[in-house]
Image (spheres, rainbow, N blue to C red):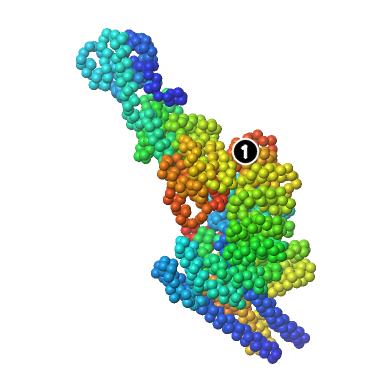
């Protein structure tokens, strides 16, 4: 019994002290962070006033000493302020903000990028991207070469993409990188057309996932150039099914095809039955966006397809044609297939409203 | 007589030891959980969101079906549905399943959303198990992506299954009628799925559940910036409990893909996997947990690398019961559900074929979560019994009790630490003090109470009831804007 | 009432209708002969009751009054009807007393015929009165009996509204409405009730419309209402409300109270190229559809249901962009825009000079110009300024396609008179829906 008692006693005491330590720790931490937050809030309020140091700088371009030196909380408040402010400035003010960051905060961020604390490295990334601090590109590349987790690596890459770094092209073309799709898209989206065109030019060398994501991003960016159109029209007959589907989707969004392009699509319709239902669905959508006689005929066939989704899409596509309404009315009234009649009726009900 | 006494002493002595070692083991396990969570939480902090992130996520997010089972909710359902129709997501449909409500929930919904009976062919996907008969299907003239399934009463699981049958997208979201979603909830919960590593499959995802009490909820939206702590002791304790359960428990378990629970209040599933697993089980009370266990089983049996993800961020809010009796019954029900889920799949217990689930998760849930309350209560009895019969001396008893008490509170402290390291919602010092003090007192009153309720459930395990709704009383002020007509008490 | 009656009576100048009232048989006979020799239609009636009935059935251009009239209420009513339409009353003085003649003129006659009746003199005098009436008719616009404008005024007002439409692109609604089952009403309760019903309806509507709305008595039981700056979506509930209120007001008759109702056809005028006559015809078509549904009905004229080519809205669309791909793209897509209701004539131009150099841009009709901002020889801003300075603003809608998304260029475009803008690269769906919105006009 005695032994147990001692063990219990020790256990009890340990737990008690741990508890107390936890309490003290939490108390101190919360107090400090609350104070920090209060100070920062006050600083931000001050900055907002029209005669604050920062506002005066924006108006006159004259940097006062108070702007340059600063404690950690001041830095943080300033960058938070400017991140919001930069969204509502004119040309001149924008340049002034850039200048300020380039001249005085580059070193600050450089130090933070080489810090051992994850938090510090990560939190600087946002500002580097937002204020276009291209001077720090070498430091970013340096960081990449170190051993960092995936999350951090992707964040660094995104900043580099935002800064239009050419290294991005190399990295993305490298299949061993194995970048997930969503990262690929995040990297592609901010790139300017210059860099994009290099991907388009070297399309065949791109790894498959990059090819797919490239098409998607160009599509949602609504890019419309001859080079892009020609590429899409070629890819409609690509060997890889996923690539074909993306190309068709991008073409549908593009909204136009050249004569050769139309021919190619019509040719691919000949192999209709061999296609997967996803490709069929996408082609049905395409035939509504880009209009031609043969397409309209095909759509009228498809409105009695076995699959509900294809029928539905075909009806929607027909509706986009000039006399789409008339055609659907005729189908509703006199088509021999009951399903076609149903879907035409439903589409008309929804369409004219 | 002496023989009996001797036997009694021996028994007591050994029992004492068992309880003692049990506690140590539990402390150890929780310590491991705590450390794992702490480590993983730190990794999740502060990734800067670039300007176009949200737009990209929206555009490339997979389409999904949100299934909302409704039973006797009337105007509350309307608010929930309306908030769902306005969420920040690109392609989705909302399927409301009226599970044979006895009040006028059906009519209210039909009128509010200008719904009409749909006669066209609805696409029914292939769940082998049937559901209670569906009476009618309605579409809405105001929202082309809103549908209403009217069916005979069959319980929440049955309602969910019916919704799954009708859904047309590859993912579905299961949500309780009274859950309130964060405005970006669906995006958050889909993020692990979208950000899956190449080759990795996420087949289910859930997040933390926050406690809505004390916060103003305006027609279905909660202002998550202004979270404040209530005064009601029961609610405060539940807040701590939730933090502990989510941040400590689920966080670490999900890291190793052995999480057996995804909150039924709000979670997303891959439809094809759920269909393969057979849909929700209408016989159990905790159908959400049972489904997840079954999914894990399917994963292991197919030797798949699929995972179930968990986000420590709160993605939805729910109303915690403020009355003891409602809370008591709730915990009783949950415990029963826990048992049913474990029992149904008892084959997996300590079965190496099921990997970490069988060898780690099951024993954890059974010995610690399930048997835990029993042993804790017994621990108390041991002390009292021992004192009464003078088998142990007072200092020992005091120390023993103290240790037990502190161990209980220690867990909650850990939770508060984790909260500080991840979300930092309770910044006010006054809130912190309140949480801390309450956490200290937990073992004196709250823990034993909860243990009693769970023990109660153990005793009732003889009787098997079919899936019940067990809704709690809806209190008008807590959940909805003042202008609403107060709900009828049930 | 058939469509034929809608045509203006004053157009048929020589076949007048004369009503011979209150004359003894022999005089009536003489008069009939005289009139029919001149090719005029004659009707005869003796009692006031009969006279009134015949008056409304035949709508005479002149009334010849014999000695059988008295200053009773019935006869006074008939006189009022005649006066309200400026129908001349010629009375026959067979007593040859100036007292009688004074009475006649005081009663309201325009002329007197003495005995014996000389055919040539009768003819000439009647003719004179008819001509005076015609000239007078042409000058007046107000129907004094009912206190509202006459049919002729519709064309004036409609023309004015179309002009406004061209300038402001705010559509107006034409409502043609007519009492339900008017013939039965006349047969059951008498023609006087009929008149009363018309008058009541006129007054009823007149008292419930805005100052800017115009109520016109087209003829008989038919009215036209012009609602400026109104969409049919807003007009329909208004009309329906009026219908409900009107039918709730019961009218007294000898054998009890009864309710009256009216049906309406509505037309939303959005195309300033339409003519008032067309508008009226379309609205009448809608009225016919409404009538076919029963009573108290409304019907809005819809182009889609009337598949006549002539009703399509025509628009010239110019695409001015130096990027060939964009030109081809827009040209092919614009062809299909608007379905059956729009008839678009699309033409592409390389830049501003190309556009202005081609006479195409000056043809009549409305234009929509899709204008790229950056072009070589004459850039978008220059084109815009020139269009706004030298051309009818209401005829040319301009949408600018700007590349750079800076405030300066957008505000510049708007200040210089662009109706809308899109930044490149643009989403097709957004571009097309903005174009449709521009074409259809702003909805408030």
Total marks shown come to 1
Can the viewer see residue B284? no
Q: Residue furthest front?
A: C377
The residue located at (51%, 79%) in the rendering is A32
**Residue at image x 73%, y 48%?**
A275
Query: Residue C140 placed where, x, y %?
Result: 32, 28
Image location of residue A335, percent across then percent down: 67, 36
Q: Is residue B62 left or right of residue C99?
A: right
What is the quadrant of residue A111 in the picture? bottom right
- Host chain of mark 1: A
**Rendered image quadrant of residue A7:** bottom right
Q: Which residue is mark 1?
A: A328
In the rendered image, the vertical position of residue B442 relative to residue A262, given as above or below: below
Q: Looking at the image, is C276 positioned above or below residue B327?
A: above
Please indicate whether residue B476 sits to the left or right of residue A348 in the image. Answer: left
Judge by depth and name the residue closer to the eye, B165 or A193: A193
Q: Position of residue B257 (x, y in %)?
A: 70, 68
Q: Nearer the viewer, residue A214 or C239?
A: A214
Say which residue appears at 67% left-offset and 69% top-offset: B254
Residue A297 in sight: yes
Q: Give whichever of B208, A101 is nearer the camera.
A: A101
- Residue A351 coordinates in the image, percent (x, y): 58, 43
């Amino acid at each position: 019994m005695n032994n147990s008692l001692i063990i219990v006693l020790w256990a009890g005491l340990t737990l008690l002290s741990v508890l107390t330590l936890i309490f003290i720790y939490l108390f101190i931490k919360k107090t400090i962070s609350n104070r920090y937050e209060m100070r920062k809030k006050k600083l931000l309020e001050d900055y907002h006033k029209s005669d604050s140091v920062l506002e005066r700088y924006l108006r006159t371009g004259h940097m006062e000493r108070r702007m340059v030196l600063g404690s950690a909380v001041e830095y943080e408040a300033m960058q938070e302020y400017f991140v919001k402010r930069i969204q509502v400035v004119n040309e001149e003010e924008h340049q002034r903000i850039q200048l300020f960051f380039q001249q005085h905060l580059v070193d600050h961020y450089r130090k933070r990028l080489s810090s051992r604390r994850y938090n510090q490295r990560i939190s600087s990334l946002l500002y580097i991207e937002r204020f276009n601090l291209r001077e720090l590109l070498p430091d970013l590349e340096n960081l990449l070469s170190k051993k960092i987790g995936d999350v951090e690596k992707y964040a660094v890459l995104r900043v580099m993409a935002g800064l239009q770094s050419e290294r991005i092209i190399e990295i993305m073309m490298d299949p061993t990188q194995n970048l997930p799709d969503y990262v690929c898209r995040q990297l592609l989206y901010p790139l300017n057309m210059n860099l994009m065109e290099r991907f388009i030019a070297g399309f065949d060398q791109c790894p498959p996932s990059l090819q797919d994501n490239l098409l998607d991003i160009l599509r949602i960016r609504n890019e419309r150039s001859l080079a892009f159109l020609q590429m899409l029209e070629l890819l409609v007959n690509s060997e890889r099914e996923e690539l074909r589907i993306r190309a068709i989707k991008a073409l549908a969004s593009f909204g136009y095809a050249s004569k050769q392009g139309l021919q190619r699509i019509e040719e691919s319709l000949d192999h209709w039955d061999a296609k997967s239902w996803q490709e069929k669905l996408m082609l049905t959508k395409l035939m509504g966006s880009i209009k031609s006689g043969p397409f309209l005929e095909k759509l009228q066939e498809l409105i009695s397809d076995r699959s509900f989704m294809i029928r539905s899409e075909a009806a929607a596509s027909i509706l986009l044609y000039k006399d789409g309404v008339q055609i659907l009315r005729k189908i509703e009234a006199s088509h021999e297939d009951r399903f076609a009649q149903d879907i035409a009726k439903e589409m008309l009900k929804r369409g004219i409203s | 007589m002496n023989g009996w006494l001797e036997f009694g002493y021996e028994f007591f002595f050994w029992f004492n030891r068992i309880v003692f070692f049990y506690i140590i083991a539990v402390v150890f396990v929780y310590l491991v959980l705590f450390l794992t969570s702490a480590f993983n939480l730190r990794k999740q902090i502060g990734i800067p969101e670039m300007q176009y992130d949200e737009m990209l996520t929206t555009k490339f997010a997979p389409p999904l079906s949100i299934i909302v089972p409704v039973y006797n909710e009337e105007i509350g359902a309307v608010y929930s549905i309306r908030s769902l129709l306005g969420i920040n997501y690109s392609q989705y449909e909302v399927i409301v399943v009226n599970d044979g409500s006895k009040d006028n929930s059906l009519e209210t919904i039909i009128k509010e959303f200008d719904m009409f009976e749909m006669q066209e062919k609805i696409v029914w996907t292939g769940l082998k198990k049937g559901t209670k008969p569906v009476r009618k299907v309605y579409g809405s003239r105001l929202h082309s992506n809103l549908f209403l399934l009217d069916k005979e009463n069959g319980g929440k699981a049955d309602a969910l299954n019916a919704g799954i049958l009708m859904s047309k997208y590859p993912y579905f979201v299961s949500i309780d009628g009274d859950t309130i979603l964060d405005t970006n909830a669906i995006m958050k919960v889909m993020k692990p799925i979208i950000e899956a590593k190449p080759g990795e499959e996420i087949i289910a995802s859930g997040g933390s559940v926050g406690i809505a009490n004390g916060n103003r909820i305006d027609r279905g939206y909660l202002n998550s910036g202004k979270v404040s702590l209530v005064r009601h002791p029961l609610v405060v304790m539940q807040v701590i409990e939730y933090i502990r359960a989510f941040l400590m428990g689920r966080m670490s378990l999900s890291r190793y893909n052995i999480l057996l629970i995804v909150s039924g209040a709000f979670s997303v599933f891959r439809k094809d996997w759920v269909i393969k697993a057979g849909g929700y089980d209408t016989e159990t009370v905790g159908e959400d947990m049972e489904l997840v266990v079954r999914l894990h089983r399917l994963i292991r049996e197919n030797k798949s690398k699929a995972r179930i993800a968990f986000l420590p961020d709160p993605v939805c809010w729910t109303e915690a019961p403020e009355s003891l009796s409602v809370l008591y019954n709730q915990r009783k029900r949950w415990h029963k559900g826990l048992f049913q889920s474990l029992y149904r799949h008892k084959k997996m217990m300590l079965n190496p074929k099921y990997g970490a689930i069988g060898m780690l998760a099951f024993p954890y849930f059974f010995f610690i979560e399930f048997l835990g309350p029993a042993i804790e209560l017994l621990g108390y009895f041991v002390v009292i019994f021992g004192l009464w019969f003078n088998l142990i001396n007072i200092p020992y008893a005091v120390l023993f009790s103290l240790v037990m008490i502190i161990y209980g509170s220690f867990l909650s402290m850990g939770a508060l630490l984790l909260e500080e390291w991840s979300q930092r919602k309770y910044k006010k010092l006054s809130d912190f003090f309140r949480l801390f003090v309450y956490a200290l007192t937990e073992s004196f009153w709250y823990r034993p109470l909860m243990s009693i309720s769970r023990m109660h459930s153990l005793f009732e395990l003889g009787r098997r009831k079919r899936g019940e709704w067990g809704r709690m009383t809806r209190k008008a002020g807590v959940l909805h804007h003042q202008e609403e007509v107060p709900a009828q008490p049930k | 009432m058939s469509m034929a009656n809608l045509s203006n009576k004053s157009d048929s100048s020589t076949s007048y209708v004369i009503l011979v009232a209150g004359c003894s048989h022999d005089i009536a006979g003489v008069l009939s002969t005289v009139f029919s020799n001149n090719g005029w239609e004659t009707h005869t009636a003796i009692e006031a009751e009969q006279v009134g009935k015949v008056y409304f059935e035949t709508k005479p251009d002149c009334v010849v009054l014999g000695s059988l009239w008295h200053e009773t209420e019935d006869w006074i009513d008939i006189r009022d009807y005649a006066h309200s339409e400026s129908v001349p009353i010629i009375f026959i003085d067979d007593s040859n007393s100036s007292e009688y003649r004074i009475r006649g003129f005081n009663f309201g006659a325009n002329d007197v015929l003495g005995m014996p009746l000389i055919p040539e003199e009768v003819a000439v005098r009647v003719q004179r009165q008819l001509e005076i009436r015609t000239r007078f008719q042409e000058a007046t616009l107000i129907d004094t009996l009912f206190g509202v404008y006459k049919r002729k005024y519709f064309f004036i007002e409609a023309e004015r509204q179309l002009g406004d439409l061209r300038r402001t692109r705010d559509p107006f609604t034409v409502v043609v409405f007519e009492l339900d089952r008017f013939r039965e009403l006349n047969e059951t309760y008498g023609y006087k009730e009929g008149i009363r019903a018309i008058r009541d309806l006129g007054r009823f509507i007149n008292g419930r419309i805005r100052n800017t709305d115009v109520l016109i008595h087209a003829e008989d039981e038919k009215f036209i209402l012009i609602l400026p700056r109104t969409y049919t979506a807003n007009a329909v509930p208004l009309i329906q409300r009026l219908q409900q209120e009107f039918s709730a007001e019961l009218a007294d008759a000898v054998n009890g109270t009864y309710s009256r109702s009216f049906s309406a056809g509505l037309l939303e005028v959005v195309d300033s190229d339409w003519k008032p006559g067309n508008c009226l015809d379309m609205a009448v078509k809608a009225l016919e559809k409404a009538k076919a549904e029963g009573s108290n009905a409304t019907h809005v004229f819809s182009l889609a249901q009337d598949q006549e080519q002539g009703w399509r809205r025509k628009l010239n669309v110019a695409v001015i962009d130096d990027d060939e791909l964009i030109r081809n793209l827009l040209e092919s897509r614009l062809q299909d825009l608007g379905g059956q209701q729009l008839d678009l004539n699309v033409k592409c131009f390389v830049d501003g000079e190309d556009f202005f150099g081609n006479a195409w841009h000056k043809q009549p009709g409305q234009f929509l110009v899709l204008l790229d901002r950056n072009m070589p020889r004459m850039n978008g801003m220059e084109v815009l300024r020139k269009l706004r300075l030298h051309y009818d603003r209401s005829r040319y809608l301009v949408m600018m396609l700007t590349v750079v998304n800076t405030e300066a260029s957008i505000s510049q475009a708007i200040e210089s008179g662009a109706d809308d803008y899109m930044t490149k690269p643009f989403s097709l769906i957004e571009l097309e829906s903005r174009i449709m919105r521009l074409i259809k006009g702003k909805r408030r």
